[in-house]
Image: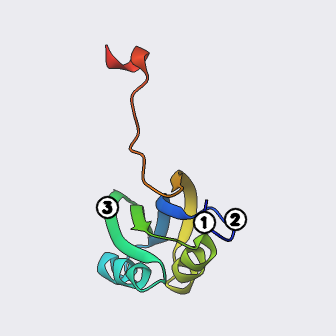
Amino acid sequence: MSKAGRVKIRRLVLDVLKPLKEPSVVDVAKALARVKGVSAVNVTVNEVDVETMGLIITIEGEDINFDDIEKELTRVGAVIHSVDQVVVGEKIIESAQPPQART
């Protein structure tokens, strides 16, 4: 926990919908990279529909502000469909497979 007692968000994985044509995937990534606390952004297209594009967005940083991320996505015309992963704390813990999933 940080000195102020606030837990830091280190990674977000978001399922996001954006209009098919504008903004471009590159523009979405650049917009998110400019948000304070963000050190890296990965945007992967996982679905294309007639009017929308589905994106999986991974954001990493030292202290990500979820509200700022949501505002920036709204500003560029995108919307969060779901939050698929959140990593908080002083370090990033990678997912581990439970024993039953290793067979």
Q: Verify CB contact (< 8 Å) between mark 3 and mark 2.
A: no
Mark 2 residue element: loop
Q: Position of residue 70 (x, y in %)?
A: 58, 74
Q: Which residue is mark 2?
A: 5
- Where is residue 97, by image quadrant? top left
Q: Residue 53: tell me if it is visible.
A: no
Badge 3 is on which residue? 44
Can residue 29 be seen?
yes
Whole-angstrom CA distance, mark 1 to mark 3, is 31 Å
Residue in front for this viewpoint, 70 or 17: 70
Q: Residue at x 33, y 66 (%)?
A: 43
| Residue 44 image-quadrant placement | bottom left
- Is 84 on the left-hand or right-hand side of 43? right
Name which residue lies at 49% across and 66% down: 17
Residue 84 horizontal/vertical position (percent): 51, 50
Could you say which is closer to the camera, residue 54 or residue 38?
38
- Label 3, label 2: how far apart the Cα atoms are: 34 Å
Residue pointed to by mark 1: 2
Residue type at mark 1?
A: Ser
Check contact, mark 2 vs mark 1: CB within 8 A.
yes
The foreground one among 90 and 52 is: 90
Q: Nearer the viewer, mark 3 or mark 2?
A: 2
- Label 3 crowding class (10 Å Cα cut-off): few <14, some 14-19, many 20+? few
Q: What is the residue that sits farthest to the front in this orientation?
A: 3
Residue type, numbered disc 3: Thr
Secondary structure found at label 1: loop
Query: What percent of the width, then of the height, locates residue 29?
Result: 35, 77
